[in-house]
Image (spheres, helix red, strand yellow):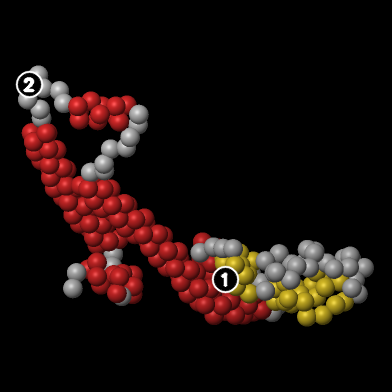
Amino acid sequence: MSKEKEIKSNPEEAEKMTAKELQQEVAKKAKKVADAANKVAEAAEAEAGETAENTEPAEGENTAEDADASKKSLFGKKEKKNPFKEKFEEMQDKYMRQVAEFDNFRKRTDKEKSQMFDQGASSVLEKILPVVDNFERGLAAVPEEEKNSAFADGMNMIYKQLLKQMEDLGVTPIEAVGKEFDPNFHNAVMQVDSEEFEEGVVAQELQKGYMYRDSVVRYSMVKVAN
């Protein structure tokens, strides 16, 4: 079974093919179409030559049929289509459709791969975020007199390095406190009375939320001013 039949009968096999292999398949199809077009053109030229030889009148001879044919052509009568030309146009159309189909398949495959990567990255980040939370709780619990100790400095350096790596991957924290409550980013767990913030504004953040590129990995858990 050829690779072309395998692609049509089994889409999963097509996804496993590399871009180079797919390009080779398209190149093979293009060569087949080009060879067939050349044969059609040669046959059409040969046919035209034979027709010209068979229908060429004797020197100095003008028939009534020639005059009628000239009149018909002058009045715009359509000439009979060449079957070889129709076959060539049909094959060319089929080739262009295959090229467009391959291009759509490539774009669809790239989009699916990107979506799968984003889903996998989001799943990993969801498991890492609790570690970030524990670092923040641990650093917040360090007594004031020990904040400049070697242990506290080491913990803080690891924490900052972790945040830097997450930022490089496209992970950013969601702004919450002082911002208007937005259900697309915030998860309100309770309402509180506040003189500092207006009604509907986030007054306190209980758990930091994060975004991965344009999607929310974890919503911010907040208290909203009443």
Asked which quadrant contains residue 53, the reply is top left
At x 29%, y 70%, the residue is: 7
Q: Is residue 51 above or below residue 8?
A: above
Residue 51, image x, y percentages: 12, 38
Residue 5, image x, y percentages: 24, 70
SS category of the residue bearing label 2: loop
Identify residue type, mark 2.
Glu
Q: Is residue 12 above or below residue 169?
A: below
Q: Which mark is residue 116?
A: none
At x 10%, y 27%, the residue is: 57
Q: Is residue 120 above or below residue 32?
A: below
Label 1 neighbourhood size at 10 Å, few (<14), some (14-19), many (20+)? some
Between residues 224 and 77, which one lies in front from this camera angle? 77
Asked which quadrant contains residue 174, the reply is bottom right
Can residue 21 be seen at all in this image of the molecule? yes
Q: Which residue is mark 2?
A: 59
Look at the image and tell me in which quarter the C terminus lies. Answer: bottom right
Between residues 194 and 133, which one lies in front from this camera angle? 194
Q: Is residue 118 left or right of residue 59?
A: right
Residue 89, image x, y percentages: 28, 48
Residue 206, image x, y percentages: 74, 77
> What is the distance, in whole Å, between disc 1 and disc 2 at their CAs?
100 Å
Q: Which residue is mark 1?
A: 159
